[in-house]
Amino acid sequence: MKQLSQAKIFGGNQSVYEHASGACACDMRFAVFTPPAGEHGEGPYPVLYWLSGLTCTEENFISKAGAQRVAAELGLVVVAPDTSPRGEGVPDDPDGAYDFGLGAGFYLNATQEPWSKNYQMYDYITQELPALIDAEFSIDGSRAGIMGHSMGGHGALTIHLKNPQKFRTCSAFSPIVAPMHVPWGKKAFSNYLGTDEKTWVDYDASALVMKNPSTAEILIDQGTADNFLTEQLKPELFADAFQKSGQKLTLRMQDGYDHSYYFIASFIEDHLRWHAERLMHILPHTKEVEGELSE
Amino acid sequence: MKQLSQAKIFGGNQSVYEHASGACACDMRFAVFTPPAGEHGEGPYPVLYWLSGLTCTEENFISKAGAQRVAAELGLVVVAPDTSPRGEGVPDDPDGAYDFGLGAGFYLNATQEPWSKNYQMYDYITQELPALIDAEFSIDGSRAGIMGHSMGGHGALTIHLKNPQKFRTCSAFSPIVAPMHVPWGKKAFSNYLGTDEKTWVDYDASALVMKNPSTAEILIDQGTADNFLTEQLKPELFADAFQKSGQKLTLRMQDGYDHSYYFIASFIEDHLRWHAERLMHILPHTKEVEGELSE
């Protein structure tokens, strides 16, 4: 693991690292914010994973969202990985489109050639990266949450629903919630996973929640002035699925906000406080409840 | 004046505009944040001008500094212009260097060919832009302050010192304070202004403050881990000048911070509150004091 940059911000440190990823068979970059040793001591800290959207790298969230101020106050480590494998030999969309290939890994394990060698972002985010973070930073890995934006909201929702005990809390901004039914998802899934739509279900939040809702409450913020709202995001599809499944959901339609980081910056504080409260206080209680239910 | 983009953030609006500048003889861009109509009504609002540093455009501050949250709360309009003239026909550094020409206007009026036609940033910032802002937005032009970073800190200091009744309050992050004596300034001034150093004095904050200190107190934050500290910024030169001149200065050396927007983001709230307090409350009192003194 090689440190590419480090800067002090709000008393903590914002760093970017590179490491050789086995899952993605290339060098991968990720950003880590570590809070100042203050009232929260020197850790171990709860950790939040942020998954970015199409075209982003590990840089967008850390330079634009303004999360460090609140993460410093709350004593949270925040990890922001890149959105796809990269580098020489990693295949890209043949037309260089923004919505597939580089910058568009969709947080899944590709099964089709030539994508399957490198595009293993699901394993990377759920296994390889957390193991590295747990080993290298002062982290309480049992208190981990996940959040993301757009394609990264899709990643956060699907990863939480399939790993609710590993990523205990989940929230999203403007997520792709029904990728099987929208152009972005159809393009990505048909290429990465092939044309058999039965294999797509495993990466579709609206389908997953019907099979297996989590016991956590999920928070979603969606801007009403989002250009992608009606064609790509379709919150009505998952609100319906969530209701039928019994998954607890707080969906906030935010009047006049668009799809940009200006929207994320406006509400990231809510999300961080929401995760922190649950990771620090509610989870032990939830565990007890789960225990009672299983008796 | 043409609106290029608009996005809602923290209840207010972050917009970017383009207009034909007479001063710079080219199209110029600037960003404007307008706060939500809240406890501060619909204006007129105090206005703060932010001047960015080398290589920046009107975008850096608005996407990275996180100022909108506090500006929304305080009811401040924040204007962030571009850092130089641009466009076809605007000359640039012959080697494309980052520290001269495009992105490096140094907030002065160039007198030398071929720069003098377009590089009139001093007139642009002090006359043309405020006139446009006053005409187009709900602004109380008598309550205007100015701040900036690095080259923009130089701009803010020199413009305040020469126009203390127009830009009433002034603060800076990591400013170039003695451009006559450092490589960045020597290169820019010798090209824009010619080799007669007597003409440079008018754009050197440390020289200006000795001639004509303002009655305002100036706030400066400077990171101790700033790569440019010893070669380009040299706060010791101006701390000395400020002390000799009687200019009130709060200079805060911030331990471990660098020259980046991570540093700016960490302390921009302090600067906005500092300006707002003075623009809203202290100026009337200062006026009285000035009145007494002139009796």
Image (cartoon, coloured by chain):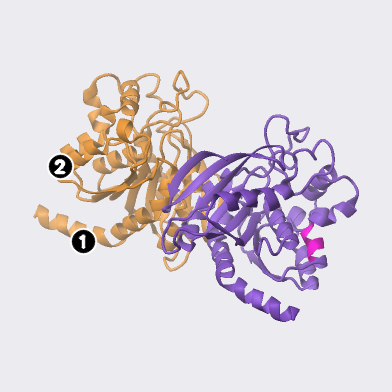
Chain colours: A orange, B purple
Q: Which residue is mark 2?
A: A245
Left/right of residue B292 with respect to residue B237 in the rendered view = left
Q: Which residue is mark 1?
A: A285
| Residue A184 falls in image quadrant | top left
Is the residue A205 above or below the residue A39 in the image?
above
The amino acid type found where label 1 is placed reads: His
Residue B208 drawn in magenta:
yes
The residue carrying pointer 1 sits among few (fewer than 14), some (14 to 19) or many (20 or more) residues within 10 Å by Cα, namely few
x then y, percent, for residue A109? 33, 30
- Of residues A137 and A234, the one nearer the viewer is A234
Q: Residue furthest left?
A: A295
- Of residues B75 and B186, the one nearer the viewer is B75
Q: Residue at x 72, y 44 (%)?
A: B105
Residue A286 drawn in magenta:
no
Q: Could you tell me if the residues under marks 2 and 1 are in contact, i.e. CB atoms within 8 Å?
A: no
Q: Residue at x 58, y 65 (%)?
A: B275
Is the residue A80 above or below the residue A269 in the image?
above
Left/right of residue A51 with respect to residue A198 in the rendered view = right
- Where disc 1 sits, the SS reads helix
The amino acid type found where label 2 is placed reads: Ser
Earlier in the chain: of badge 2 and badge 1, it is: 2
Start and end of the magenta stretch? B204-209
| Residue A94 falls in image quadrant | top left
